[in-house]
Image: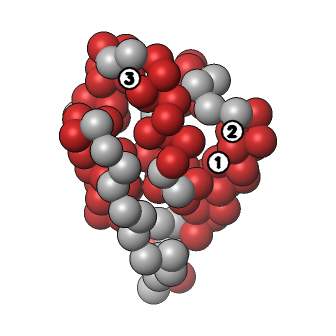
Amino acid sequence: MLQQSLLGLAAKLPVVQVQNRLMACTDRDFALALIGMESEDSERLLALVSPLKANRVREEIQLQEARHVESKHVVVALNSIIKSLESNRIVAGRRSYLRPRRPRSDR
C-alpha cells in the first residue's frame, strides 16, 4: 500500500530531509496522503512538521473527508509526496480544486 511506502520512506530517510519535503508539500496533498491512515502513523508524520502546518493539515483532513474525495486523488497526492521524498527534490503541487463526489445515498 502507498501509505506504508510513505511511512517506510519517512523512517528510512534522514529526519531533516523528510521534514523539509513535508513542509514544502501543499497542505491538501499532505492531508489527502493521511486520509485513512492509522492515527498513530499520521501523528508520527505530523510531528515532523511545524505545529502550525500540522494544525492546517488536520483541518484539511476534516474538510476533505467531508467532501468525500475520490480515492484516485488520494493516490495522486501519495505518489507526489513519495516522489518528492525519493527524488530529493520538491515536486510541484497539483491544481487546487478537487471536485467533490456525492455520497452514494444521494445518487
Q: Could you tell me residue 63's position as x and y percent?
A: 66, 62
Q: Is residue 46 above or below residue 32?
A: above
Confirm whether residue 69 shows in the render: yes
Q: Mark 3: give few (<14), some (14-19) or many (20+) Cα within 10 Å.
A: many
Three-letter amino acid code at disc 2? Ala
Q: Could you tell me residue 37's position as x and y percent?
A: 46, 34
The residue pinned by badge 3 equals 10
Checking the image for residue 57, the label placed there is 1
Q: Could you tell me residue 51's position as x and y percent?
A: 76, 34
Of 83 and 33, nearer the camera is: 83
At 26% from the left and 29% from the top, the residue drawn is: 5
Three-letter amino acid code at disc 3? Ala
Q: Mark 1: give few (<14), some (14-19) or many (20+) Cα within 10 Å.
A: many
| Quarter of the figure with residue 64 | bottom right
Q: Is residue 49 left or right of residue 101?
A: right
Checking the image for residue 54, the label placed there is 2
Q: Which element is circle 3 on?
A: helix
Whole-number angstrom distance, CA of label 3 to CA of label 1 = 17 Å
